[in-house]
Amino acid sequence: MTVTAHATISPRPGTPGVHPHGLPRPGRTLVMGVVNVTPDSFSDGGLSFAADAAVAHGLALLEQGADIVDVGGESTRPGAARPPVEEELRRVLPVVRELAAAGATVSVDTMRAEVAARALDAGARLINDVSGGLADPAMLPLAARAGTPYVLMHWRGHSAGMQGRAVYDHVVTDVLDELRLRIDAALEAGMGPDRLIIDPGLGFAKTPDHNWELLGRLGDVVALGHPVLVGASRKSFLGGLLADRTTGEPRPARLRDAATAAVSVLAAAQGVWCLRVHDVASTADAVRVTARWGVEATAARSPLSRVR
Ligand code: PMM
């Protein structure tokens, strides 16, 4: 009897099914470490604001197992004001340049085409645009021209008025529909389908319940057929879930890393391509465990397991 094991089982739990062109491909979900070069980042208390400290932080994240470091100069915290473009460039470029020179795969977290273009010149290899091309009409054409992988996130407006837009008929269907429209816009702008990464945008115009519903249906996002990136790290919906039982106070951001790692395991098991996290060490372990587990789960389901 000829047995064609694995032929119909793809991806196995813990490994992404599709990969963007030109990025690391370690056979498991990737880990993207966050380097926020902002004075008001809610999750690192602005500790990485100075360029030197940000570079050192990025190098430490690589040491801990980050596959990509994501450098951003604009806070997207609900209610945050936007920095002028010159200020964003001043924050981001030296950090991108140094981390790229050290051999890191660097992504730039920006909604501005000018910042993305200058960061690519400085050595970035991936654009992470939380607005999915909506904030700056020059972004999709720039990403298409550059031929670089591009993270297209679900977004409904800038941080200042974002939470007022958290209104959906059905959050999963609406987010999928809106993502499809942005994917079409990216393809129409000339972007190669193999460059496109999608992201459901947890916490962006979403209530905690919206975030949980999207996580529960991540498989539907993966089924859109593009690599998926998820950014749940330390977000307030985790703080709310883990609120203090006596006072009802949300769990502080710095104490949400175990919950983040739990999300990482479950998301990786759904075939998510990459996880954007602050605490790299715990998610680096989580994705390795999930991938190794997936090998056995696949073997157990394969026709070969019955003839062993
Ligand atoms: N979240 C934040 C910033 N950038 N990028 C992507 N692709 N997805 C996200 O969910 C995302 C992001 C906000 O989180 P932070 O302020 O803790 O970095």
Image (cartoon, helix red, strand yellow):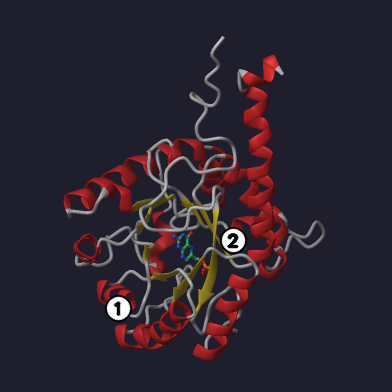
For the question of whether residue 170 can be seen, the reply is no
Label 2 within 8 A of ligand 1 by Cβ: yes
| Side of 17 where 238 appears, left or right | right
Q: Is residue 111 above or below residue 200?
A: below
Nearest to N terminus: mark 2 or mark 1:
1
**Quarter where residue 236 is shown:** bottom right
The residue indicated by pointer 2 is 233
| Badge number at residue 265 | none
Q: Residue furthest front?
A: 1
Image quadrant containing the C terminus: top right
**What amino acid does circle 2 point to?**
Ser
Which residue is located at x 78 percent, y 63 percent? 247
Q: Is residue 300 above or below residue 231?
A: above
Q: Position of residue 67 (x, y in %)?
A: 53, 63
Q: Residues within 10 Å of mark 2 (few under 14, many from 20)?
A: many
- Residue identifier under label 1: 121
Work out which residue is located at the far top of the displayed protein and give it.
1
The one nearer the camera, 89 or 172, is 89
Residue sitting at x 72%, y 66%? 255
Q: Position of residue 79 (x, y in %)?
A: 45, 71
User: What is the crowding at mark 1: few (fewer than 14 residues within 10 Å), some, or many (at least 20)?
Assistant: few
Q: Which mark lies nearer to you, 2 or 1?
A: 1
Is 290 in front, or is 223?
A: 290
Q: In the image, is the residue at mark 1 within 8 Å of ligand 1 by its beta carbon?
A: no
Quick check: marks 2 and 1 in contact, CB under 8 Å?
no
Figure quadrant of residue 275 = bottom right
The amino acid at mark 1 is Asp
